[in-house]
Amino acid sequence: MKAGTEWEKDNLTGLLSRRGMETLLASYGDAPEISLTLLTVQIARFGNVNSGMGVELGDRIISLASKRLSKLFPNATALARPHGDHLCMLFEGDQDIETELERLHDFTQRPFAVRGKVVVLNVKVGIATTDDPPTQPALLLQASEIALQDAKRTKLKTSHFSPSMVETAQHVHHMENDLRVALVNHHVEIHRAMANEEFFLVYQPIVDATTGAVVAFEALMRWNHPQRGLIRPDVFIAFAEKMQIMDILGTWVIQRAIYEASNWPLRPDGRRVGVSVNVSPTQFVEPRILLQGIREALDETEIDPSLIKFEVTETSDFAETMKSTLERIRQLGCCTSLDDFGTGFSSLTQLNDLPLDYLKLDRSFIAELDSSNEDQARLSRRITQAILTLAETFQVEPIVEGIETDEQLATVRKLGARLIQGFYFSKPLSGDRVADFIRAVGGK
Ligand code: C2E
Ligand code: CA
Ligand code: CA
């Protein structure tokens, strides 16, 4: 820490406050002789810890995490808590930032106990330096926060600031404002947006590669905004979660998907096709709403519940409610599936703990299967194989998603995968094209 000055502190952690860090950064002037690197770390989904376990426990976690960081990075020039669940580290000179990052991710993945609960932190990191691209010290905090948003959007652990992110950030900001107006201020607006079919579902087939028959479709949400056009779910779902309106949207998805699926034609061989519905982790905060939505849709359509599958992602928050809710979902006769497997941090525990029927391998491994980098391709093949073996051990049926090429398909089939989803078979289809698809490739 630069000596001789009392920078403003944060009460909870004793680290610098936002203002403290800003004043410190400004004190380096416009063109410092040494290079500076600022890391902004956010504890992923921390809002859920607060709402699920209480603010007091949330504060305790932040304060323990900040103590651990101070110990872990004795060579940091300063540490700060600019707000809420954000912690910052400033480094002077030529630090090996990649090594620091490895240590950081390694550290956060080690569970620790807080008031009798075991907590695992999953963090996202935004990085900005004064060198590349040249950035004034006073702008570093903002730049690292923009990079952090980028990491969250792209689902990466870490992102380095680049100027193009500013435009994206502005675009997302406008979009969020629209969503806020449409969804938060007036609940009526949601119904308007739904009634106007601004939200709609597209369906991507899941194919049994041994027979070529379609066994189910995954429902994927789209928002056709009157001014901004088609908006992808990655962006608006994260925001809907943050604004705690995912329950409303999620219930709509469940009911619409089950209703539409109940009207799909039979396959040529007389079988029915199933539907997979994504459920956001925040929908487990109030499982009552989720379960009621499912029950209503089942009652109304009288569909065979075993045709309905709910896809959930790994989460360290409210793992307990997720477990009991998945049990209830199964009692209703529906199936459960763990999505994006392999990207999380406590994969093995969850596979053992959660009542699951299916497991979906994350697309990132598949994309690298036919990488021109032979080492990379070999590693992905090994991971894919290991996950398929794991699925067998835990008696869950694997689904491989993101298959785009002949080569990827051949590789995963050789490794024993049966259920496949990906652009190779079809991109997500609009509702009215699903029937044709079922008739065409439904299974003989
Ligand atoms: P996801 O659940 O992993 O869904 C698969 C995503 O991968 C879809 O993107 C799909 O279009 C894309 N995809 C499928 N096959 C391929 C392929 O071969 N290559 C490539 N490059 N991409 C492929 P989409 O529709 O943009 O959805 C993104 C994410 O948004 C979903 O990831 C899911 O996490 C979330 N999402 C979508 N709809 C809903 C919803 O109704 N509720 C919730 N909670 N989340 C949703
Ligand atoms: Ca999914
Ligand atoms: Ca997935």
Image (spheres, rainbow, N blue to C red):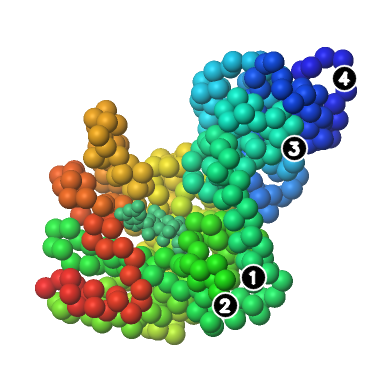
Q: Earlier in the sequence, mark 2 or mark 4?
A: 4
Q: Secondary structure at mark 1?
A: helix
Mark seen at residue 318: none
Where does label 1 land, which residue? 183
- Which image quarter is the C terminus in? bottom left
- Distance CA(mark 2)–CA(mark 4): 54 Å
Q: Nearer the viewer, residue 81 or 90?
A: 90
Where does label 3 land, which residue? 82
Q: Secondary structure at mark 3?
A: strand
The type of residue carrying mark 1 is: Leu
Tag 2: Cα neighbours inside 10 Å, few (<14), some, or many (≥20)? some
- Which image quarter is the N terminus in? top right
> Which residue, as the protein is rendered here, is positioned at the far left?
444
Q: Does mark 2 have its CB less than 8 Å from ligand 1?
A: no
Query: Is 421 drawn above or below residue 111 in the view shown?
Result: below
Q: Does mark 3 have its CB less than 8 Å from ligand 1?
A: no
Mark seen at residue 193: 2
Q: Earlier in the sequence, mark 2 or mark 1?
A: 1
Question: Residue at left 55%, top 44%?
Answer: 164
